[in-house]
Amino acid sequence: MRKGLSRKNNQGESLNLAIFASGNGSNFAALIKAVREKKIKVKLVVLVCDKPEAFVVKRAQKAKVAVILVKREDFPSRLDFEAAIIQRLKNYKIDLIALAGFMRLLSPDFVKRYRNRIMNIHPSLLPVFKGAQAIRDALSARADSTGVTVHFVDEEIDHGPVILQEKIKIRSKDTLASLEKRIHLLEHKLYPQAIKLFYSGKIKFS
Ligand code: GRF
C-alpha cells in the first residue's frame, strides 16, 4: 500500500477523487450515488472532460461537481494537453483518478506521475476484448461470456494490474443493447467496490 494513502486513511480522512470521462457518464453518476449513500468514503472533487458537449458535463453541473474542460485540439501536443490537466488538478489535491470512458490515451509520463493511483474500468474480462468496441467484439466473437474489469492503468492500452473482475454470461438472445445494459449495471456495482478496496488498504502493490 502507498504510505501516503494508508496514512491519510488512518486519520479517517476521505480520499479526493477525480473522474476523467468523455461521454455519457453513467459510471460518474453511479460513483456520485455511492458517495451520497455513503457506500464509499471519498470526495468526488472534480470531473476532467475533453468533450464540452458530453452528457457527463451536465451530470457534473447538476451534482455541483467542479469540471475541468480541456480540449486536446487547443494544445499543440499531448504533453501540453496533459500539463494543463496536471496544473489545474493541483487545486484539488487528488489522491485517486478514476477513468470512466475517458477516450484519450494517457502518456507514460502522466502514468508515472500517478502510478497506482489511476484506475480504469473496461467492459470485458481483460486481457480479452481490449479497445473501444469491447462489448460488440465479444458478441461478434460469439463468446460464451464476457465481463467487467477494474484495473490500474499502466503505459499500455487497457492493461495494468487487475483490481476486480466479474464475469457475465452472454445469452443466445442477447443484442448489443441488452448486453450493454447488463454490463453497465455490473460496472456501476464494481467501480465503487474497487475504490473501497483501494482506500481500505486491501490492494498490495509490488
Ligand atoms: C463504460 O462501458 C466503461 O467500461 C468504458 O467506457 C464506458 C463509459 O460509460 N471504459 P459511461 O460514460 O460511464 O456511461
Image (cartoon, rainbow, N blue to C red):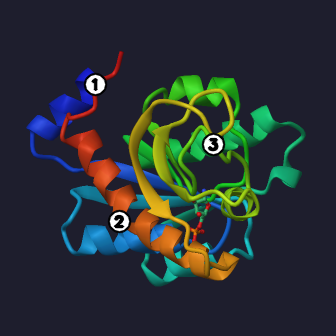
Mark 2 = which residue? 189
Q: Earlier in the sequence, mark 2 or mark 1?
A: 2
Pointer 3 residue Cβ closer than 8 Å to ligand 1? no
Callout 2: SS: helix
- The CA span between labels 2 and 3 is 21 Å
- Asked whether the viewer can see residue 94, the reply is no
Q: Nearer the viewer, mark 3 or mark 1?
A: 3
Image position of 104 (left or right of 112): right
> What residue does disc 1 label?
204
Expressed as whole percent of the image width and height from the top left, the position of residue 126 reads 56, 42
Label 3's element?
loop
Q: Is residue 48 left or right of residue 96?
A: right
Where is the N terminus found, in terms of image quarters?
A: top left
Q: Secondary structure at mark 1?
A: loop
The mark that comes first in sequence, 2 or 3, is: 3
- Residue 171: quarter of image: bottom right
Q: Position of residue 113 (x, y in %)?
A: 54, 25
Picture quadrant of residue 45 = bottom left
Q: Amino acid type of disc 1?
A: Lys
Crowdedness near tag 1: few (<14), some (14–19) or many (≥20) residues, C-alpha within 10 Å: few
Callout in the foreground (2, 3): 3
Residue identified by numbered label 3:
128
